[in-house]
Amino acid sequence: MLPERKRDLGESEGGRGGFEVRVIGGSAPAAVELTEQNRSGVEVGVVIGTSNPRGRRQLLPEDGPVLRLEVEDQGDQVKARSMSEVGPAVPREGSRKKKRDRLHQVTLWMAGGVCGIAIVAVGALLARRGDDSPKPQTASQAPAAPVDTATLERDRFVSDSAQLLAESENLIRRFAAAKTPEEGLPLLRDAERVKPAFLRQWKVWSAEPAFADGQTFEWEVDTSGVRPMIVISGVKGDFTPFRATFVRQGDKMLLDWEATAGVGDLSVSDLAEGKEASDAVLRAVVSPAAFFTPDFPEARYASYRLSSGSGEEAAWAYVENGSPAAKALHLELNEGSFLMQKNSKIFFTLKVKGPARPGSNQYLITEMLHKGWVSP
């Protein structure tokens, strides 16, 4: 495309000015200079190419030829895209602002990650606790108090004592009337467990009539031991005393034969004869004593008298001062009290070993199992 000569100054709007553009090409440098003829207007020249090596401009004659401006073939040209494809212009963001934005995004991602980990950890902890955590109580619900089953059983035993006493009196009459051990076995507590010992030691009531004429049974409800019980005492038809212990098992009363007969690994009569004992279970009536020997000096031991339920047999037993058994017996027998009787007799279930010398009736108490003859 050839350059177009512009209109003269007089042909322009208003007749006051105009300009003319000439494109100068070629390998030689070119320049445009104002002349006297067009000094009233402005003529612009465009210099294309390298600078004049001599620093001198050459003037192009006014009526000289117009050179063709050609551009070397640049190959495939980049196709212009429409504004709809390019999109609206966006202000350029500085590198500092971009760096701040990236740091802000990284900070947010890190904070979100930490929160996510914390939430997962708390959720896992709550899930592991599960049912162990206490359930929230509503405003109308009060937290349930722990139930003491032993206390409830004692209270119910006392409230039902009249009915339980009648059942116990009926049981002792049936037991006294039994002629064989098989007749008496169903009336016993833990019948299967005590059956071997019961069959070995069975004795007929051996009194006719079974109870003294016109006698009234004496009874007591005892809830101080490891299990509530009713104790009935009286006199047989031959005027020998008896003492029977009854406990409730399930929904009925039964005779506790071990507690009634004072049965253990050994009896007090066995100890009176000096039989060997090695942590043998013993049911005995225990009372404080003041009998000491060289084997059991007073400086190291406390002395006690052991007797059977009837009080006819007796043996001596000692416990080392400061031992758990000594503390338990000392407390139960009120030996440190100035107000209560010190020489009281209490039924205990113990473990003993001995004798100290062959044939003697002196034993060492190794453990106090529980107060009373009724086992838990």
Image (cartoon, helix red, strand yellow):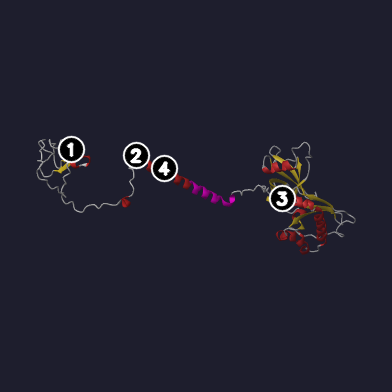
Q: Amino acid at mark 1?
A: Val
Q: Earlier in the sequence, mark 1 or mark 3?
A: 1
Residue at 69% across / 44% down in the picture? 325
Is 340 included in the stretch rendered in magenta? no
Magenta residues span: 118-132
Q: Nearer the viewer, mark 1 or mark 2?
A: 1
Q: Is residue 167 above or below residue 333?
A: below
Q: Secondary structure at mark 1?
A: strand
Determine which residue is flagged by label 3.
150
Foreground residue, 302 or 132? 132
Identify residue for label 2: 96
Cα gap from disc 4 to disc 3, whole angstroms: 63 Å
- Front disc: 4 or 1: 1
Mark 4: give few (<14), some (14-19) or many (20+) Cα within 10 Å. few
Q: What's the mark number on residue 42? A: 1
Q: Measured from the top left, where is residue 161 in percent x and y?
A: 80, 53
Q: Quadrant of residue 203?
A: bottom right
Measuring 77% from the left and 52% from the top, which residue is drawn there? Answer: 157
Estimate how packed mark 3 is, as few (under 14), some (14 to 19) or many (20 or more) residues with alpha carbons within 10 Å.
Answer: few
Q: Are marks 4 and 1 in contact (CB under 8 Å)?
A: no
Measured as percent of width and height from the top left, residue 147 is found at 69, 49
- Horizontal arrangement in the rendering, residue 163 relative to residue 45 (left or right): right
Point out the frontmost of discs 4 and 3: 4
